[in-house]
Image (cartoon, rainbow, N blue to C red):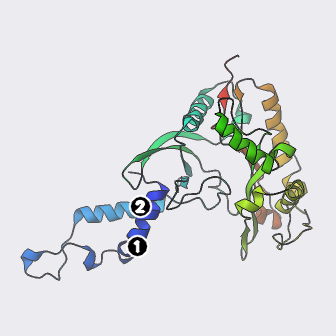
Amino acid sequence: MMYDGLEVQNYITTNKKNITCGFNNQHFPHNSSSGNSNQPTFSLDLFIFRTSFIQILKMLKIPSHQVAGHHASSATRGPLIDDSGRFYKPLQGDERGSAEVTFYDQFTSNTQIPDHIRKFFPIYYGTKVMQASDGSEHPHIVLEDLTTHRENPTIMDIKIGSRTWGPDASNAYIEKCMKRDRETTTVKLGFRISGLQIYINEGVGYYKPTRDLVLKSSVDDVRLFFKKFVSSDPNVESGMGPDRDLASVVYGGPNGILAQLLELKAWFEDQTIYHFSACSLLFMFEKGLVLEGGSPNAQVKIIDFAHVTEDVTV
């Protein structure tokens, strides 16, 4: 049995004492027939339940490196990860959820997709129904956790395209998207930064600007974020003139972010299989390793395919 973020959060909140106290006497039924009401009787069902839930808590976690999108909390469903390197994303209840599943199903089995392009997409493991706290069941798409093998990833999430709705979007949804696109750099730059985190060092941790700060960024602010992304300055949060010392090894070089983007761009310009709308790019690298003289392990991934449609004219 699997649980989503809402159930995990609610269970911890309402049963915190039981979880932390373990097999305390007060949490077991008492054997009144023994004549000693102070002696607990062993409940196999309770033992199995608690043991199973402890395993569930260990297995499902809120992603610590998520920088954009809906976050799991006691009030909202959001993605979860497990220790096996899988990412569980709740499917949206409208056509967007089914559209994303359809894309992954078709993309995974499509022999026209070259291997050097597949590496840019998360591995797809299918869908899984996960029980919610109210007893209802909710489908999740199961993907590769893109940060599972990383130590202290510096990450940027970028919504690409000057138009962020699909061809089948309703008028109401189009108006909503147009408003957001005008309020951000989407219209001016053809993309907007949705979120980012920058690793500073072991003592400080991460610089992670708020969602509002990122979305309200001007064109100049976006330029500054790209400079901060590759800065070695530990005061990058407050600094207005980041040094960009890591730009050549992160953005440049044969394995850098720019080279990967050009490889992906060439395929997008040539392929006639899909219409991609409102997808996002993830830029990731290991700043700590670079500062120690190692490889940045820079990586580009493309995610979010709820608005992708197949080109039926081909």
Q: Residues within 10 Å of mark 1 (few under 14, many from 20)?
A: few
Q: Is residue 211 visible?
A: yes
Q: Give the residue at x 55% y 53%.
A: 78
Direction from residue 166 to residue 109 in the image, left or right = left
> Marks 1 and 2, how far apart in space?
16 Å
Q: Give the residue at x 90% y 57%.
A: 220
Asked if labels 2 and 1 touch by Cβ distance under 8 angstroms, the answer is no
Q: Give the residue at x 11% y 82%.
A: 36
State the residue position of label 2: 55
Which sits earlier in the primary sequence, circle 1 or circle 2? 1
Tell me the amino acid under the disc marked 1.
Lys
- Is label 2 in a helix, a strand or a loop? helix
Residue 84 spot, x, y in % from top left? 53, 53
State the residue position of label 1: 16
Q: Residue furthest top?
A: 313
- Is label 1 in a helix, a strand or a loop? helix
